Image (cartoon, rainbow, N blue to C red):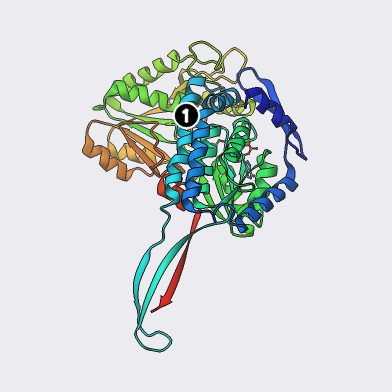
């Protein structure tokens, strides 16, 4: 499906609400537009998902057949890597090379979870219950069944459109759920091609249903819907709290992957070249629009100046630009709204006396580009230090010892990720235990594998994605008892 046909098709999709423009964040120009699907479409999509589930169209199929279809989705995604990457790159402004690197790993979600289809077993229990109804010793047998929840709503943000979609659709399919999928309103393009691929691979009608619309319309209606059993949501902590409230009507289950304000600890014995490079890329890559971006760096005092200077040098060497611009390695922020938000934090910090080592301004050109920004002399009470900015902005503070580093790192309402750079491995593992984060990376950053669970501590989320926990999240456990 050529790029242009996605742009055309999206215009023609039926809708009942506002017309929503899709903006190229590099040129600030409209790429295409679509009509918000409206509430009736949410009801219809849930009804389609429900009837496909009740009919057993998908979960009633032999697990090995479902696995084959999921494997076919991955193969088709591989055939369409270029188009999927182009759509994400056009829609988010990320470098095309970066998008091309990410898409194959998105396809891999379907292969990885295809493998789980045939391995979702319960457990068997030898139980001996005394004093049963008859008052006599009863020999019993019990086992558990793992069953799909039914109809699930999948809602995710714009920062990695194909990745976010596949990370949810693949485990939901492996579990046997039927889903209603709502991508971010800013980035609907690749989802339309993905919808076609999923159908072409042989997933029956009604099993995966795509809705395009706003969060406060389509997303809210899906979250409150009485016939949806679970919502899997990735996005901001603020919207995550709305989801929890909206889900209370039918007490639907909720999985949340939320924001972060992830600390990076750099010790004086670290491989400093590597630590500086990775800590810089760990915040500036994708203009800081990654949930695990290390936005609070703490450096042991003896090497503090060296690290600040090294990170600022990398910040200044990065070439910002659109996918079409020669040599660019960092794209823009996603939208005017996000630009205003990020600059708001920076400007407030300047007024409150932070030192801007480098950056602190948007680029003097079209597009939502913000110069990678390094801030020091930051008071921990400042909003920019406490709240997730989701932009290329990092604060760097010094520490003296482990206790101080841990106290500063853990002083956050978030707990998504944390990193330690040190060649003292005993210390690294001790810190891994003390840091309050769902993921701790030791002497590495920006790591990912489909098999490793990912989830947030504190207000960074509920539950886990990826790995076995990722598919388990779409299954409920039934205990069955039998008297022998
Ligand atoms: P967001 O505003 O929370 O939106 C996320 C998704 O929720 C979008 O599809 C959005 O639709 C929808 N939504 C908004 N309001 C809703 C409502 N009342 N009910 C149901 N759905 C609603 O987040 P964002 O600004 O798009 O993305 C940035 C955030 O995502 C950051 O905080 C980042 O940390 C987080 N994130 C977390 C992870 C992780 O795995 N932990 C990964 C990536 C990003 P609209 O687009 O129409 O608003
Ligand atoms: Mg949004």
Q: Which residue is mark 1?
A: 102
Residue 125 location (% of width, % of height): 35, 69
Task: Tell whether 167 sits left or right of 54.
Answer: left
The quarter of the picture where the N terminus appears is top right
Residue 349 location (% of width, % of height): 52, 26
Residue closest to the eye, 90 or 295: 90
Residue extending furthest toward the right: 16
User: Does 45 appear above or below 389?
Assistant: below
Quarter of the figure with residue 417: top left
Residue closest to the eye, 358 or 157: 157
Residue 32 location (% of width, % of height): 70, 25
Residue 102 location (% of width, % of height): 47, 29
User: Does 195 appear above or below 59?
Assistant: above
**View quadrant of ligand 2:** top right
Disc 1 is placed on an element classified as: helix
Residue extending furthest toward the top: 326
Residue closest to the eye, 135 or 3: 3
Quarter of the figure with residue 374: top left
Q: Which residue lies at the image location 28% right of the left edge and 38% below the top edge?
A: 402
Task: Tell whether 435 sits left or right of 387.
Answer: left
Residue closest to the eye, 217 or 363: 217
Task: Tell whether 92 sits left or right of 425.
Answer: right
- The reply to whether residue 463 is visible in this rendering is no
- The reply to whether residue 286 is visible in this rendering is yes
């Amino acid at each position: 499906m050529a790029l242009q046909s996605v742009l055309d098709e999206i215009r023609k999709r039926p809708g009942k609400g506002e017309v929503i423009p899709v903006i190229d964040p590099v040129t600030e120009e409209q790429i295409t537009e679509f009509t918000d699907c409206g509430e009736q479409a949410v009801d219809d999509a849930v009804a389609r998902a429900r009837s496909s589930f009740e009919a057993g169209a998908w979960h009633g199929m032999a697990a090995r057949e479902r696995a084959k279809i999921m494997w076919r989705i991955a193969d088709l995604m591989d055939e369409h890597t270029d188009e999927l990457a182009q759509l994400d790159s056009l829609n988010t402004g990320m470098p095309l090379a970066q998008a091309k690197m990410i898409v194959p790993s998105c396809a891999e979600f379907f292969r990885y979870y295809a493998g789980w289809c045939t391995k979702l077993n319960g457990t068997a229990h030898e139980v001996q219950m005394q004093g049963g109804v008859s008052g006599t010793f009863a020999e019993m047998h019990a086992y558990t069944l793992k069953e799909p929840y039914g109809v699930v709503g999948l809602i995710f943000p714009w920062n990695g459109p194909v990745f976010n979609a596949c990370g949810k659709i693949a485990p939901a399919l492996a579990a046997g759920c039927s889903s209603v999928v709502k991508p971010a309103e800013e980035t609907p393009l690749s989802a339309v091609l993905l919808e076609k691929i999923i159908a072409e691979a042989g997933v029956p009608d009604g099993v995966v249903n795509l809705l395009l619309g706003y969060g406060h319309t389509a997303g809210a209606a899906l979250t409150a819907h009485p016939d949806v059993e679970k919502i899997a949501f990735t996005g901001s902590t603020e919207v995550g709290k709305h989801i929890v409230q909206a889900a209370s009507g039918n007490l639907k289950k909720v999985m949340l992957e939320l924001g972060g304000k992830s600390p990076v600890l750099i010790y004086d014995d670290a491989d400093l070249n590597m630590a500086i490079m990775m800590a810089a890329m760990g915040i500036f890559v994708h203009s800081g629009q990654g949930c695990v971006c290390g936005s609070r760096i703490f450096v042991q005092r003896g090497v503090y100046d060296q690290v600040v200077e090294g990170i600022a040098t990398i910040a200044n060497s990065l070439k910002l630009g659109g996918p079409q611009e020669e040599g660019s390695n960092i794209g823009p922020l996603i939208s005017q709204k996000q630009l205003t938000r990020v600059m708001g934090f920076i400007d407030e910090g300047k007024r409150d006396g932070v030192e801007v080592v480098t950056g602190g301004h948007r680029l003097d050109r079209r597009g939502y580009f913000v110069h990678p920004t390094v801030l020091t002399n930051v008071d921990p009470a400042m909003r920019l230090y406490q709240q997730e900015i989701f932009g290329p902005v990092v604060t760097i503070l010094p520490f003296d010892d482990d206790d101080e580093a841990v106290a500063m790192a853990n002083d956050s309402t978030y707990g998504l990720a944390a990193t330690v750079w040190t060649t003292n491995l005993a210390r690294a593992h001790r810190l891994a235990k003390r840091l309050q984060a769902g993921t701790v990376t030791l002497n590495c950053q920006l790591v990912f594998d489909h098999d490793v669970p990912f989830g947030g501590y504190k207000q960074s989320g509920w539950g886990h994605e990826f790995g076995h926990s990722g598919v388990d999240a779409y299954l409920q456990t039934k205990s069955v008892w039998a008297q022998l």
